[in-house]
Amino acid sequence: MATEVGIEADQLEALRAAFGGTLLQAGDDGYEEARRVHNGMVDRRPALIARCHGAADVADAVRFARASGLEICVRGGGHNVAGRAVADDALMIDLSPMKGIHVDPQAMTLRAQGGVLWHELNREAAAHGLATTGGAISTTGIAGLTLGGGLGWLMAKHGLATDNLLGVELITADGDIVEVTEESDADLFWALRGGGGNFGIAASLKYRLHPLQTITGGLIAHPVDRAADMLRFYREAVQGCSDDLTVFAALVHAPDGSGMKLAAMVAFHTGTPEEADRDLAPFKEWGPPAVVEVGPMPYPVMNTILDGNYQTGTLNYWLSSFTSGITDGLIEVAVDRYASVPSPMTAILLEHFHGAVCRVGIEETAVPHREEGWNLLLPSVWTDPADNDANIAWTRDTHAAFGEHLTDRRWLNYLGDDQGADAVRAAYGPNYDRLVELKRRYDPDNVFHHNHNIQP
């Protein structure tokens, strides 16, 4: 007797007998909540949700899915805009209950399970005066962000999250549990450092940590009618800046709910207070700005300052590409297009890549984006489903309007659910063919394909 799509009752009971976590089907308490991810546009119904408590649960779930003929999708933090963490009629392997974190302050390393969120990791590391590169939104899961590259405030100082990855406790397509490091399997470790969820499930990840406690950071904002001037200033002001300084630029709405449009810079500095004052002075004095909210704060607090714009359950549609520079033409398009933005939650964001992230060779990890410059992100966010068409159309039209100012390089973790093989290839550039060969070696049946897929 089958209980759900592809699930035999006796097989399910055998899984349940040893399973340390919780197994949920439609109608069970907790199923509706467990199938929801960050992006409220995603509404899919797995045949079974396996809420795992450890690597053994994950391995059992993989073997069960393969024996049952079920497809596998994997949820870590559930934050990815594409919503690939959940699929109809699949077995959803849910890592979110897996919250274990261990810091070794002497070795300056940290091991965290695959369900940990960045604010949880940051808190434990900070208790020892340590940190590593994490996401700019604290509610993002560590596993998906790291496996996809992992940009964040510390990337100019210490590289991407994946550049600080030392090992992965991986569940393979066969349901084996293996510890993957540079020493144990250099090829697979290379693929995991940017290859997304294509090569297995990260039950836990080991990171290199760095001494860091208090940083200087915050928001500098100008009236939107100064946007073009501010972006031209910003373009010049960040040239040659130190590894300690990262500044992103954006066209945004005021966070007070007034709907007022602003031209803003988000600043982050890891140096001494004196160094921060010196390096940030030009940004704080130009204009003059309407708002300067910049000061010392713990690093974990910096990772929360944008959280309010990205609430779980909001509707999201994102597009991004690396730019060919911040040209006058790009600035003109940004100002023109933002004048018609349909949602007060949507931004046009320029993320600056420089410093340590750009001193890693293109082929040293699976992430090829090592050129100094900017990634242009259009994170469209809104709340009313009646506004879906207007917001999606604005995002697509705006991305197209930037066309001549963009390159063909794409950031993997920003790819949406409607972007296919060409976008995945653009995310990997010259590393794509090697990833295909490694996919054939480690997952020839493409068991892990509910992701931005590298087809074997």
Image (cartoon, rainbow, N blue to C red):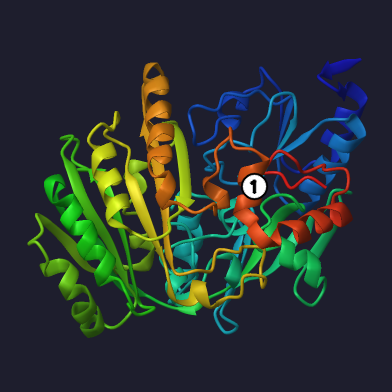
Quadrant position of the N terminus in the picture: top right
Closer to the camera in the image, 371 or 264: 371
How far from the left and from the top, in percent, is residue 35? 61, 29
Report which quarter residue 253 is drawn in. Answer: top left
Identify the residue shown where x is 60% and y is 27%.
Answer: 30
Q: Secondary structure at mark 1?
A: helix
In the image, 4: left or right of 250? Answer: right
Could you tell me the amino acid type at mark 1? Val
Q: Which residue is mark 1?
A: 424
Closer to the camera in the image, 111 or 100: 111
How far from the left and from the top, in percent, is residue 71? 79, 33
Count every numbered label the image shows and give the total.
Answer: 1
Judge whether residue 148 can be spotted in this image: yes
Identify the residue shown where x is 73% and y is 62%.
Answer: 191
How far from the left and from the top, in percent, is residue 150? 54, 60
Report which quarter residue 247 is drawn in. Answer: bottom left
Closer to the camera in the image, 431 or 247: 431
Identify the residue shown where x is 32% and y is 43%.
Answer: 347
Judge whether residue 116 can be spotted in this image: no
> Circle 1: is it few (<14), some (14-19), or many (20+) Cα within 10 Å?
some
How far from the left and from the top, in percent, is residue 26? 68, 19
Report which quarter residue 339 is drawn in. Answer: top left
